[in-house]
Image (spheres, rainbow, N blue to C red):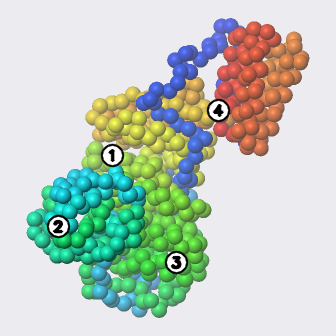
Amino acid sequence: MISNVKKPICALLACLTALPLFFVPASAEAIAAPAADDVIVNLSAEKQVIRGFGGMNHSVWIGDLTAEQRETAFGNGDNQLGFSVLRIPIHENKNNWQREVETAKKAIEHGAIVFASPWNPPSEMVETFTLDMSSGNGTTYQAETGTTLTGAAVQSTNPGYTGTGYIDFQASSDAAIQWNNVIIGSTGTKNVKIRYALQTGTSYLDVYVNGTKVISHAAFEATGSLETWAEKSFQIPMTSGNNNTLKLVTTGTEGPNIDQIQLTAYVVDPTAKRLKHDRYDDYAQYLNEFDSFMKSNGVELYAISIQNEPDYAHDWTWWSPEEMLRFMKENAGSINNRVIAPESFSYVKKMSDPILNDPEALANMDILGAHTYGTNDKDFPYPLFEEKGAGKELWMTEVYYPNSDMTSGDRWPEALGVAEHMYNAMVEGNFQTYVWWYIRRGYGPMKEDGTISKRGYSMAHYSKFVRPGYVRVEATKNPDPEVYVSAYKGDKKVVIVAINKGTSAVSKDFVLQDGYAPSVSSWVTDSSRSLAAGAPIDASNGAFTAELPAQSVTTFVAELETVDFGSLAGIVEKFVSSDPGIQHALVSKLNQAKDSASQRNTNAMQGQLDAFINQVNAQSGKALTEQQARVLTELANLLRSLQI
């Protein structure tokens, strides 16, 4: 939208008669190419739309928020968190539904969105069964690194491997690969998944754990080609520790090529619960009934989830990937709201991959929801969603981080890890929401006494400033080893959140591309301050310098100037009043750029301004003095970079 006259151009118009004294062109330093460790914020490189930040209210398990606590959570004034997302439970006991209404209504009153997740269907829809499955993402160990090889070699001839190579056994007997320093968090049965390739026949390997044979002659069937990779799983008891070993040994047959192993927990539960397979229709209508109840009580839900943590349901209802896929294909389409699925507890892709790969199921999913408990940073990206999730949203719908110690809310710099975790979710994961577990808890954003914790202030650096509908934009994400940066735009503002994990302060130059702001406001949280406002920072030529204190998170907010072509045309008319031909040519180019801007055609607008600048430079020392040419070039470059 074309705005009225703005300050930079107004100021220049006001002092046209004193240009020789007051106009100072950009210095060589100011217009030099950005340094390698500068933070470059490219306002034209848009990423995901942000829906918001928030947390869970579960009135049955820990009690409802009080009226004052609701204001602290969802208000956005002083000493408030500015949360814009509320998650509530769908209780299996309908008598408890009313208990979630008041907090949900207050959240909506403050502009937040509300979504709901069920833990269990009504008891009459549930049955018990014997669960026998792997659980979680686990840990992957490549075959070519961190291993001891006997009669085996690293190769990379056949494509399709996942690391930098694979292991080729060189002997049919007693050739071996041993993984060293295998980390096991808790003693118990583990699922060991081996990725391999074998052209023909069947190969047999012995499996050893810590020097003891645990499986004899494990069979590996042919994959049909050395370029075709398959997976074979075994269940093996293992002991907690960081120095476990796991070894595969050939036993007289040609061994398969080994790419990697993946270790996950393995769950056996003879009393597990699941939704009866003949009650899927009834369950969909039960979710609709909850949606209708909330609506009739003044709460318009934004979305409904199918199940909370279907793959970690020790105390609630399990769903296999196949069951979730069936429901999404056959039943989710009858739900009268946006549908969230599958809400895996650790962003386990095997729960959501089948949905993304099935057009019918995908059509019925509006939001891919995930929890990130124990999820490694490297597992935050989701290429399959980027490939197939067009038109769908990606939400992080529950986490607490890094622990649930009831006295941990104010620990620093531990609480700084929350800001970093949010950075990873936004930048590496491209999530559109970040939703904490309980809003009020000793380890939550709000302590039990209703005051904001250090963890809460870390969250507030995002939630108070990055508002619903803002868009993440490209920014130099790791300009120093201990510095992490993300940037967002909306409401004619740019918001930059910068985290310094280091033990020393760091000075950083921030450069705005395709945008201009004359000054910047800032807020900082560190060991002694909590969202403390800083002094205004002057910006010059779309850049500013700021210090990031040791072990801190800082939010910068800048009001972006908007485009005004009329004032620049007025300056042209004054500068070249003695040459109507040149004046007309320059003003015509500005009018063309103005028309392109009104049509939101950025490329055309910038091209026409470039043509204007070229003609200005051609007239420098002729119809225009060198100083006049510098003024017009400076302002045209300003217009070229501003937001339309």
Describe the element under mark 4 as helix, strand or loop: helix
User: Which tag is nearer the camera, tag 2 or tag 3?
Assistant: 2
User: Which tag is nearer the camera, tag 1 or tag 2?
Assistant: 2
CA gap between label 2 and label 4 equals 68 Å
- Label placed on residue 625: none
CA gap between label 3 and label 1 equals 38 Å
Which residue is the site of mark 2? 173
Which quadrant would the N terminus be assigned to in this image?
Answer: top right
Describe the element under mark 2 as helix, strand or loop: strand
- Disc 3 crowd rating (10 Å Cα; few below 14, some 14-19, many 20+) is many
Describe the element under mark 3 as helix, strand or loop: helix
Which residue is the site of mark 1? 416
Left or right: where 247 falls relative to 443:
left
Between disc 2 and disc 3, whose residue precedes? Answer: 2
Which residue is the site of mark 4? 641
User: Which tag is nearer the camera, tag 3 or tag 1?
Assistant: 3
Between disc 2 and disc 4, whose residue precedes? Answer: 2
Between disc 3 and disc 4, whose residue precedes? Answer: 3
- Disc 1 crowd rating (10 Å Cα; few below 14, some 14-19, many 20+) is many
Between disc 3 and disc 1, whose residue precedes? Answer: 3
74, 322: nearer the viewer: 322
Which quadrant would the C terminus be assigned to in this image?
Answer: top right
User: Which tag is nearer the camera, tag 1 or tag 4?
Assistant: 4
Q: Amino acid at mark 3?
A: Met
466, 295: nearer the viewer: 466
Between disc 1 and disc 4, whose residue precedes? Answer: 1
Which residue is the site of mark 3? 328
